[in-house]
Structure formats: structure tokens, C-alpha cells
Image (spheres, rainbow, N blue to C red):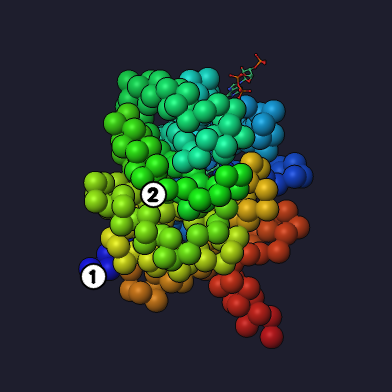
Amino acid sequence: MPLTQRVSIVEVGPRDGLQNEPATIALEDKIALINALATAGVQRIEAGAFVNPNWVPQMADSAEVFAGISRLPGVTYSALTPNIKGFDRALAAGADEVAIFAAASEAFSQKNLNCDINTSLERFAEVAAAAHAQNIPVRGYISCVLGCPYSGKVAPQTCLAIAHELLAMGCYEISLGDTIGAGTAADTQHLLNCLLTEIPADKLAVHMHDTYGQALSNIFAALQMGITVIDSSVAGLGGCPYAQGATGNVATEDVIYLLDGLGISHGINLHQLMAAGQRICDKLGKRNNSKVTLAHNARTST
Ligand code: HMG
Ligand code: MG
């Protein structure tokens, strides 16, 4: 299959990237990050999460984040919403889009959502109905598609069944999360071979954490199978508080470099993106996890 000519990046750094940071991050730094990403050309930004603040304290100020950003036309600013309470908060904050997030493993669902998969799907159906009544698009996530940190292997058929449930609720797209970043390109192909028998490629996205350094090769495998939406996190920030040891998503900068090499357009200015990533790393006092930025910094510092 020929590769797509255009990829859409979903930047999850301000949410997935920052949610696991132990130290308090200044509101102005979160806002500056989102504004810098939009200015760099990112058109889909997950800006926060309206989850229980006792569970994920770092996202407690998402309403203030939404209130503080300078919205650019054509950019979608979205938020995670685990239940109707979260949806009401997201609506009040002015989120353009919401995301619901099911797990493909019972153990992870319990740890992340405090309920079993079926109960979570009932709550998500309520959120989706409320969102659609307000003309707010709903994105669906499935976590642990290539393995669960608590129960190990996950069958592609399980992911397929949950994807159907989320699509039936009206999700316009399903993002497939390798939450623990342990899957390989072969696992990605195996999963997509199963899903693509019943779900068109343009309804699927990939969300690869990079714990085992496999994210870019998984993304390439997905591109070869017709996937055109890629989630990533600037500077490779992040991890999930309920998947211990899992590192951040693949760095957006590194995905952009891959896409440039493949001649696939994406609309993002790599230099501005690298600057946005470096700035938040400096603010957090963290090493930048984008290999492309590290290589660029090494070359320009000599
Ligand atoms: P719970 O404690 O079972 O909720 O949490 P509850 O319904 O029993 O309510 C308990 C209290 O929480 C109540 O307050 C509620 O009002 C409050 P009280 O009456 O005790 O004062 N509450 C809320 N407050 C604010 N906003 C809300 C909300 N909901 C309840 N939305 C819940 C259940 C689902 C809320 C909780 O488990 C939760 O917040 N989970 C989210 C965890 C999370 O954010 N994880 C990280 C994101 S997922 C991820 O990273 C994976 C992903 O990137 C894809 C991948 O990598 O695979 C998406
Ligand atoms: Mg994630």
C-alpha cells in the first residue's frame, strides 16, 4: 500500500506529557506550552483532563489552562473526560472536543478508572450522548492494546470489540494506546491486521509510548498499513500514573523528522516545535527525550 501523503498529529504533551510530573507546574508554563505548540502549526492539542483531581493532581487546573490559552483558528483544543462530571467541567471550560478512554484489560480499567470495562463503557456512553447533544466531537482511546502492566498479553479481538463499542457511541476516531510502550512492529501489525478487517483505517490512530524504544518503528508499521493519525508528545514527555515505569509518548519532534524523511506532509514547523519542547524541559528541569532535538542541540552547541 502506498504511504499516505498527509498525517495529522495529535499532540498529547500538555495532558499525557504533564499528567505524571511530580512537581507542580506553573499554570503559565502549561499555557505557554500549548500556545507555542499551536504557533508551531499543531492543529490538534490535548490541553488537559477533567478527571478526579485527587487521582491526577497535575490536571486539577485544566479549567484555568483552557481559560488562559490564546486560541488559534483551526486548532482543536481537547480534553479527557472520564464521566459526566468531567464532561460538564470540560464543557464549562470551553473544550472543543472530548476524549473518553477505555482499557483493553480489566486490571488496567480498575487501576485507571476504578471500575470494570463494562461500567466504564456505560459512563462513556453517557458522556458521548451529552457531548453529541452539544455538537462536541468525541474521540475514543483504548489503552493497553499491546499489553497490560498488570495482566500481560491483550488479544487484538478484545481491542476490536471495544473499538466497536466506542464507534457505536459515535466516537469519530479510536486512538490505540500502547500504554506501556512495550509492543513491537510485529505486535502493531498483528493488532492492525485484526482491526482493519472491520474498521476503516481513517477511523484509527496510534498512540505509542516509547518505553522500550519501539514507538517509531511501530508508527512506521502503522503508516504502512494506512494509518494517518499519530498521537505524540513534545519532547517525549510523560507517562501514565497507573502504568508504573512507562515513559512518555514518542516525541513529536522525532515523528516529524520521520515524516519529513518519508515526504509526508504534516503542517508543523520542526524548529518552533523543538523550541517549545526545550522550553518546557528547561522549566521542568528535565532532559529532553526527543532524539532529534538532542542531535540538533549537540550540533549547534559546537
Ligand atoms: P472515583 O473516585 O471512583 O469516582 O473515580 P466517584 O464517582 O466514586 O467519585 C469520587 C469523588 O470524585 C466525588 O467527590 C466525585 O465528585 C469526584 P466527593 O463527592 O468525594 O467530593 N469526581 C470528580 N471530580 C472532578 N472531576 C471528575 C470527577 N469524577 C468524580 N471527572 C474516576 C473515578 C474515573 C473519576 C477516576 O478514576 C479518575 O479520575 N480516573 C482518571 C485517571 C487518569 O486520568 N489517568 C490518566 C489518563 S489515561 C492515560 O493516560 C492513557 C491514555 O494516554 C492512552 C494510553 O496511553 O493508553 C489516554
Ligand atoms: Mg498515553
The residue beneath circle 1 is: 2
Q: Nearer the viewer, residue 280 or 223?
A: 223
Q: Residue at x 62, y 83 (%)?
A: 299
Q: Is residue 214 above or below residue 31?
A: below
Which numbered disc covers residue 254? none
Give the quarter of the image for residue 113.
Answer: top right
Is disc 1 surrounded by few (<14), some (14 to 19) or many (20+) residues within 10 Å? few
Which picture quadrant has residue 98?
A: top left
Residue 293 screen position, x and y as percent: 59, 71
Q: Position of residue 3 (x, y in %)?
A: 27, 68
Label 1 close to label 2 by CB (< 8 Å): no
Q: Secondary structure at mark 2?
A: helix
Which amino acid type corresponds to the residue marked 2 in the rendered image? Pro
From the viewer's perspective, tell me whether residue 20 is left or right of residue 120: right
Above or below, comparing residue 285 to residue 168 in the picture? below
Q: Quadrant of residue 223?
A: bottom left
Does any portion of residue 226 appear in the rendered image? yes
Q: Nearer the viewer, mark 1 or mark 2?
A: 2
Q: Residues within 10 Å of mark 2 (few under 14, many from 20)?
A: many
The kind of residue on which mark 1 rests is: Pro
Is residue 76 visible in the rendered structure shown here?
no
Q: Secondary structure at mark 1?
A: loop
User: Most extreme residue toward the bottom, as rendered?
Assistant: 302
